[in-house]
Structures are given as structure tokens and as C-alpha cells.
Image: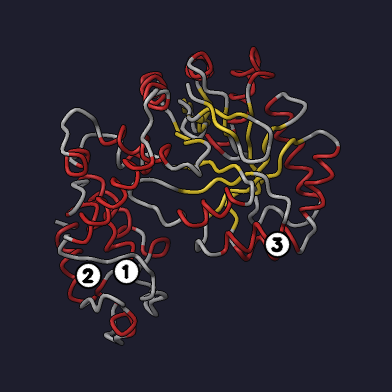
Amino acid sequence: MRYRKFGNTGEKISALGFGCMRLPEVEREGVWSVDQDKTDEMLGEAFALGVNYFDSAYYYCHDNSEAAVGRAVKPFREKVLLSTKCPMGDELKQRGDYRRFLETSLRRLDTDYVDFYHFWAINRRVFDEKIMGMGLLEEALRAKEEGLIRHISFSFHDEVQHIRHIIDTAGVMETMLVQYNLLDRSHEEMIAYAAEKGLGVVAMGPVGGGRLAAPAGLYEKLTGKHSAASYELALRFVLGNPNISCALSGMETLEMVRTNARVAGNEEPMDEQEWAQIAQAMDEIKKFGELYCTGCGYCQPCPQNIKIPHLFQLYTYYNVYGLTEYARKAFAEYRADPAQHGNLSDACVSCGRCEKKCPQRLPILQELQKVEAVLGA
């Protein structure tokens, strides 16, 4: 396993981190539990292979992940870095709730301290109204002074430009967890900014939530080689970014642990030149797709709540990258729940706002209808 400097935290982190949100579970009469034996085996094997970063959260695995992780790492707790997250939704109503959630997580993990405690899945509004407005940073600093947490962190889900505001306004964030992979490089600039400011950066979704976990012809398209699966290219690409400290993979089986550890432990990681070539190749391949949506989001918000960039992105997965099964499945999920995901083109009232704002001058309504016909076939 290779290890990297984790920002200015003083820690060395393994290139591969273990995301503990997909631990093996068992359901009996409507009650879910984690299969502790399998979890012990997987986390124990990961540790033996050099993984030293284990990431959980308050609600993972039907609220059971933290306790399962705590038991699994007990034999080597002092040799690893534990990460978990404080819920930031409606359940956090007042300043004292931060300490309450932290103490519950410590009890579940059966540990005296958490190495990295995240403000979980925050956006600009939550940061301004809760973290700053409720004084949660002061709570975090007090917990750090008491030795309950060692480092203050955040995970992020919002428009990318807000990362700068969070880092600069807070002034005490030490690590950041964001989405980053071969297909979604939208955070690249802010990842570099975070690293410049001394934050350690962990990439979640390094194999695209499973989209790149199987051969799909993508590796051959980008490299001209036939020998590697797409997931290997994807993981190596993430780790080839010098501003990334760790690639966090949600591993579900012993085989996944061993495979990912092998790739992350590659003694010849992707160098800067190869990384830049792959990034450029991805952009060039996308440009030659028949529908070139850059994902800029200028067409949003749609008055009829049609998620245009998302639907076009699914078509890119299908048509450009050969991820046909994933694209069709994701489209079916989108179509099945408009209240959660958004509407389709049949909700369009032809207001023309999206097409007027599109830098690529795409005939958006026409393209949407084509995309829906292909993905829904």
C-alpha cells in the first residue's frame, strides 16, 4: 500500500480508504443488522493489506455501520484512522445536538475519540445557517480541545463554487470529502484549491458509484490497450491527481477489498503526464459524441423541473462511454419518481429559456425527446 501526506493534519493516509456504507447486511422480520463476521473479515483483510482509513457515518447500514466498524477495528484501533459524520438535516435543531450526535457515535464505535469528524453532506445554506449560524464550529473546536475529535472535516454536496466560501469562511477545516472520478471531474479546481489551503482531500465515488466497476470498452478507447478493466483505469486516474490524498471506495466483498488494494498499491502509479493525457482524452471523446452537453448547468433551473444536464449526462454514459446498462437503469429510476428526481420532456411548455441560455446552442427539447426514447427503449 502507498501512503500520502493528508494535508496539514500530520497524518499519513493510505491511498485506498474503506467506505463503510455498503457492509454486508441481513434482514430478519423487517429488522436490519450487519453481518459482523463478514465485516470483521473484510476490514481485517483491508488492514492487513495496508488500508488505514475507515469511513463510516451516523446513518449508514440502517444505523448499524458505526457499531460494526468499531467492533471490527477493535484489535488494531490505535493503528488506523476512523472517520464518521454528524447529521446536518432537520434532526439537528440546536447547537447541543452536535455534541449529542458525537457522543452517540463515540459510543457506537466504542472509542474515546474520532480521528476525523465530518459535517455531513453540507451545502452553502447548511453551512451559513447551521454551522456558522448555530455556532457549530465552536462546538467542534471545543470537542477537539477535549480530545473527542482530532480533526475537523466536511463532506460536500452542492454547486462546486461554494467550496471556496466554506473553506475561507470557516478557516479551521482540515479535510474535505467530495465526489471525484473519471466521469465527474467538476470538483477538480476546488480540489486543487483545498490542497493549496492545506486540506487533505478524500475522493468519494472513485469508480463512479459502480459505473466503472466493470469492463465497458472505456479503457481501450482511452489508452488503446486491452488488458485492464475500466475500474482499474478509474481508480488509477483518481490517485493520479496529486491533490487527492485518498480514494474512498465503498467495498462490499472480500474480492473487492483485495482488488482495490492491489490497484491502489501499484508501485507505478499514473504519472502526471499520463494523467493529463487521460483527462484530455476523456474530453476529446465526449466532444465527438453526437450530443455534446458540457454539463455547465446554464439551462437550469427549468421552470418545469426537468433535470436537463442529468438526462444528457446519462445519454453520454450510454452513447460515449458504453455504460449502457447503468444509463438505462438510472433513467428508469429517474422516470419512476418525478417528485424526487424531476420531470421528463412531456412536462415542457416550450418557454425556450434553456435553449436561449445554452452556450452550445443545443436544440434541447428535440434532444431530450431523442435521449428519452433511447434510454427508455
Q: Which residue is found at the position 64% from the left and 42% from the top?
A: 85
- Marks 1 and 3, the one that precedes in the sequence: 3
Give yes or no for contact between labels 1 and 3 (Cβ–Cβ under 8 Å): no
Q: Residue furthest front?
A: 273
In the image, 40 versus 204, the foreground residue is 204
Mark identifier at residue 308: 1
- Residue 113 image offset from top left, x and y in percent: 75, 30
Quickly name the residue at label 3: 169
Q: Residues within 10 Å of mark 2 (few under 14, many from 20)?
A: many
Q: Secondary structure at mark 2?
A: helix
Three-letter code, disc 1: Ile
How many labels, in total?
Answer: 3
Give yes or no for contact between labels 2 and 1 (Cβ–Cβ under 8 Å): yes
- Marks 3 and 2, the one that precedes in the sequence: 3
Three-letter code, disc 3: Thr
- Residue 375 image offset from top left, x and y in percent: 19, 57
Quickly name the residue at label 2: 368
Mark identifier at residue 338: none
Q: CA distance from mark 1 to mark 3?
A: 32 Å
